[in-house]
Image (spheres, rainbow, N blue to C red):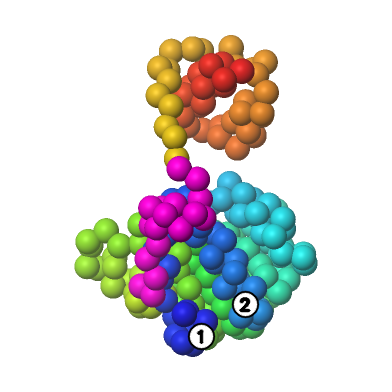
Amino acid sequence: DYINADFGAGILYCDTGAGKTDITMYIIWALGVNTTVLIDGIQLLRQTQRRYESTFREEIGVIGDGSFERKRITLMSVDSGYDNMNKNTEKGEIVRGLLKDTELCVGDEIHKLTSPTAVELKTRFHSYYNLGASATPHKKCAARDGLLTSMYGLPVASITSKQQHDAGRCATMHVISVPCRTPMEYAKSTAPIWILNSKLITKNASRNAIIGNIACVLG
């Protein structure tokens, strides 16, 4: 509907695990235009890069974490875009080129994109299509909600995990409660979950302890 009605702007509300990234990628594919995806944080940038590269049959550009290469679809770290958009450097030229040439600007997890730097960067885009995606786009804060609406438009779709489950598109979620008392060091010999933890989750001690304990239980 977003594509067929040619809204130009809109926010996709989608529960965690209900397919937000897949729907966003489908819209990008269906429109087939120059696209920039704004992302907050390097970890999410690289996670999104892996997901996009496994889906699209083309190279994905990345601005951030030491990379400065634009493609038809480019993932941009907000900090890297903002820090370079006014610089008279090669990186600055790349960012300004994206601001000018992007036809679809996607805000990933837009509830994180309300800082002054994120807002200023977004307002510099000349894109006709503007899509915001989040599990929690609005939190009953008039000023914040109005800011997101001004950048990405009104909500155009709301998809819940229950709807996806009832339609047979996702499995039922099962939650296992595991007491957190095993030292993280004991998890080093366990397999994939420790590897994921050691590479991607390095700064959250509480979550690390929980994941390490789960690794011991499952391993």
Q: Residue furthest right?
A: 58
Where is residue 107 shown, x and y percent of the image? 49, 66
For the point 47% across and 79% down, the residue is 2
The residue to which callout 1 is attached is: 4
Dot 1 falls on a residue whose secondary structure is loop
Where is residue 183 shown, x and y percent of the image? 51, 12
Residue 63 lies within the magenta run: no
Looking at the picture, tell me which residue is in the foreground, 163 or 178.
163
Residue 169 lies within the magenta run: yes
**Number of marks in the image?**
2
For the point 45% across and 43% down, the residue is 172
Q: Which residues are magenta?
A: 155-172
**In the rendered image, which quarter is residue 30 located in?**
bottom right
Quick check: 205 above or below 171?
above
Dot 2 falls on a residue whose secondary structure is helix
Identify the mark at residue 30; answer none if there is no mark.
2
Where is residue 66 shown, x and y percent of the image? 70, 53
**Is 161 left or right of 107, judged from the image as shown?**
left
Where is residue 10 shown, x and y percent of the image? 42, 76
Looking at the picture, tell me which residue is in the foreground, 15 or 202.
15
**In the rendered image, which quarter is residue 77 located in?**
bottom right
Name which residue type carries label 2: Ala
**Is 135 left or right of 59, judged from the image as shown?**
left
